Image (spheres, coloured by chain):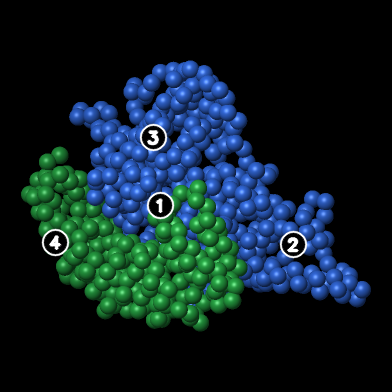
Chain colours: A green, B blue
């Protein structure tokens, strides 16, 4: 079906005041347009611009949610400013990330990092979650700094570094050193194990072995939480590194 | 992985806890030491008998998500003499109370602990294993958290909600050496009529499969209602987008027509992955595709005259195609085997050598298979890796329907090839403070 911008006038106007329980059938032309613009950059840009314009004050929360879902499929760097403006907003932050996390543009990563530096509490953990989901390497120094922060944020930062698992992430986790916070320590161990697994998959057996041995030593010394499971996981990893027949 | 300290005050266990397993066993030992003065302290239940292992040999279990399917899973484990069931967790008071009641009724005491927040249940160091039967949007976070806390997991199907979750769940299971079994209790039992002829080689090399089952899930815009006091709505939603409470959004019934969470995209893949997990699971087992993932999803658009609805298929690297809702008139004729009106498997008709059908370990169906593997540390019948492979096809089909186009899947990279929009649908942002 060809894209027809004019046919969206009424559905988009109706959408502004949409609330849960409203007639979603009215938005079927918008749903169809999201599919139709796939191979038509000009139409896609038009649709994106019209949807993005609804992410402003005056539209309902449900309408913003609907728009974010659509932008998560067709959004580009052009939508980033309006989505980024919602990141500090407790009600809409998640749905803004819902779109931004999927937009494969440098501007989206930059917006999430910018918000990471300013929002607090659960919203900050949300930024960490989305940056991890994007595999964003530019945020590694910020995550490294957060490892020394409050417990919940530090756990999230460690989890994210494990998801990103680049050499820089390994370095950040190694440099974190010990902590008396058991939850943070456990998350760092898990992240380091994830990094070692990634290195092993890449055939970097010596680097992976170094992480596993370090964790095994720490477990033997009783300086990691859940020493038994850490020791077993590290031993399993060391054996995998020795097994040259295993996939690497 | 979302295993953070709870943001709000921890919910105290409702009901008396049994204490830790070590504490329990220590208690038995102390009682034994004091047997002269108080021999009656050692119960026959603790010591075991001909049909019941002693407490020290039982698998200590808890359950997360104790509603409809969870209660069935709970009963299956609770009925086993080699399981000691000690804790339940559910965000709904009714399910929580009912689940605790079943356990306490079974053991004749009030010891079963009841939790609102799964993180508190997983923090117990006396648990060997948990079963999880929450809505699908919780599966990955809870399974990975359970593995990290040293628990084996029996996880209801469909094991994954997104394609990105599967590899992370497998990694957590392998990292910590945990037994993680998927939970389709029907795959071996209910599909014998297609499993045995296929493994016996009666229809030759498998060429195609036709599965008839409902479609993917839909967005949910049900109206807001007052949140009843017996549900922790924020925790029910968890990593899913915030939406107002509506009973049709969160009911755990087995329908997919709009009055249950199984209908909606934030919590489920719809009938395609719900009943689909059984039909695809049975089919993939029958055709011995469990080790493989599809390499292509093909979208077949509706006919221009509207008489023929759209349908989809996935293609495996060994040449087998599995069709979802292909019109009957387009299906091949014989030779084939069928499972009711829902599955048709077509072979080349050249009989081939029979292979022995894999079976469950232990006794008691898939539940017994899981418990046996917890004891032996073997991989279970529906090991998480096989479960993830199984669910990959339905997820690919769901994305092909959503985008209305065909997709190629790079198994090694776990990405679609040449379709950036499709790759956006590999996963979704989780609501704070949850992280995978």
Whether the residues at callouts 2 and 4 have beta carbons within 8 Å, the answer is no
Residues beneath discs 4 and 1 located on the same chain: no
Q: Write down the residue under mark 1.
A: B161
Subunit bearing disc 3: B
Q: Nearer the N terminus, badge 2 or badge 1?
A: 2
In the rendered image, residue A165, in percent from the top left (x then y), is placed at 38, 64
Measure the alpha-carbon separation of dots 2 and 4. Answer: 62 Å
- In the rendered view, tell whether residue A182 sits above or below residue A30: below
In the rendered image, residue B143, in percent from the top left (x then y), is placed at 50, 58
Measure the alpha-carbon separation of dots 3 and 2. Answer: 47 Å
**Residue B146 located left or right of residue B400:** right
> Can you see residue B434?
no
Subunit bearing disc 1: B
**In what quadrant of the picture does the N terminus of chain A appear?**
top left
Measure the alpha-carbon separation of dots 4 and 1. Answer: 29 Å
Q: Write down the residue under mark 2.
A: B56
> Can you see residue A237?
yes
Tag shown at residue B87: none
Tag shown at residue B317: 3
Q: Write down the residue under mark 4.
A: A78
A150 or A16: nearer the viewer: A150
Whether the residues at callouts 3 and 1 have beta carbons within 8 Å, the answer is no
């Amino acid at each position: 079906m060809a894209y027809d911008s004019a046919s969206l006038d009424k559905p988009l106007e109706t959408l502004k005041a949409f609330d849960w329980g409203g007639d979603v059938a009215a938005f079927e032309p918008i749903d169809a347009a999201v599919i139709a613009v796939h191979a038509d950059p000009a139409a896609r840009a038009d649709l994106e611009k019209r949807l993005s314009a609804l992410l402003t004050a005056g539209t309902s929360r449900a309408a913003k949610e609907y728009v974010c879902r659509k932008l998560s499929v067709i959004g580009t760097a052009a939508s980033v400013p309006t989505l980024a403006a919602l990141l500090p907003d407790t009600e809409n932050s998640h749905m803004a990330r819902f779109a931004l996390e999927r937009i494969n543009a440098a501007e989206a990563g930059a917006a999430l990092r910018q918000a990471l530096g300013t929002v607090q509490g659960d919203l900050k953990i949300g930024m960490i979650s989305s940056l991890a989901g994007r595999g964003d390497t530019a945020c590694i120094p910020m995550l490294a700094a957060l490892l020394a922060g409050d417990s919940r944020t530090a756990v999230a930062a460690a989890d994210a570094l494990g998801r990103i698992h680049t050499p820089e992430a390994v370095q950040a986790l190694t440099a974190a050193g010990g902590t008396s916070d058991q939850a943070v320590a456990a998350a760092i161990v898990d992240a380091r194990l994830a990094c070692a697994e990634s290195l092993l998959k890449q055939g970097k057996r010596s680097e992976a072995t170094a992480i596993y041995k370090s964790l095994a030593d720490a477990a033997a010394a009783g300086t990691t939480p859940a020493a038994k499971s850490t020791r077993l996981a590290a031993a399993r990893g060391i054996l995998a590194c020795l097994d040259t027949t295993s996939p690497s | 992985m979302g295993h953070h300290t709870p943001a709000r005050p921890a919910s105290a266990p409702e009901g008396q806890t049994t204490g830790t397993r070590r504490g329990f066993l220590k208690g038995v030992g102390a009682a034994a030491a004091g047997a002269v003065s108080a021999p009656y302290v050692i119960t026959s239940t603790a010591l075991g008998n001909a049909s019941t292992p002693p407490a020290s040999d039982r698998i200590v279990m808890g359950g997360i998500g104790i509603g409809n399917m969870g209660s069935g899973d709970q009963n299956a484990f609770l009925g086993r003499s080699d399981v000691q069931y000690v804790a339940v967790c559910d965000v709904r008071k009714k399910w929580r109370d009912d689940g605790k009641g079943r356990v306490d009724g079974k053991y004749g005491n009030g010891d079963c602990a009841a939790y609102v927040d799964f993180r508190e249940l997983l923090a117990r160091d006396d648990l060997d294993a948990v079963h999880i039967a929450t809505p699908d949007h919780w599966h990955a976070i809870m399974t990975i958290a359970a593995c990290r806390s040293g628990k084996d997991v029996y996880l209801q199907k469909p094991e994954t909600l997104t394609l990105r979750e599967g590899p992370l769940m497998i990694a957590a299971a392998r990292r910590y050496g945990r037994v993680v079994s998927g939970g389709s209790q029907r795959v071996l039992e209910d599909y014998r009529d297609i499993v045995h002829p296929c493994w016996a080689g009666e229809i030759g090399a498998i060429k195609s499969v036709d599965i008839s089952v409902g479609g993917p899930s839909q967005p949910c815009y049900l109206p807001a209602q007052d949140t009843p006091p017996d549900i922790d709505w924020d925790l029910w939603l968890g990593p899913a987008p915030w939406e107002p409470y509506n009973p049709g959004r969160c009911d755990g019934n087995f329908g997919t027509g709009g009055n249950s969470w199984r209908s909606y995209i934030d919590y489920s893949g719809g009938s395609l992955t719900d009943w689909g997990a059984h039909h695809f699971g049975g089919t993939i087992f029958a055709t011995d595709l469990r080790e493989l993932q599809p390499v292509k999803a093909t979208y077949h658009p509706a006919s221009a005259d509207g008489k023929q609805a759209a349908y989809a298929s996935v293609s495996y690297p060994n040449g087998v195609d599995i069709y979802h809702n292909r019109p009957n008139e387009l299906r091949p004729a014989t030779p084939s085997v069928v499972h009711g009106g829902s599955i048709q498997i077509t072979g080349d008709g050249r009989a081939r050598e029979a292979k022995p059908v894999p079976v469950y370990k232990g006794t008691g169906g898939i539940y017994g298979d899981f418990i046996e593997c917890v004891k032996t540390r073997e991989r279970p019948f529906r090991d998480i890796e096989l479960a993830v492979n199984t669910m990959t096809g339905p997820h690919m089909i769901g994305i092909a329907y959503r985008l209305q186009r065909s997709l190629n899947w790079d198994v090694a990279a776990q990405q679609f090839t040449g379709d950036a929009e499709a790759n956006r649908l590999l996963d979704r942002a989780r609501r704070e403070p949850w992280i995978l």
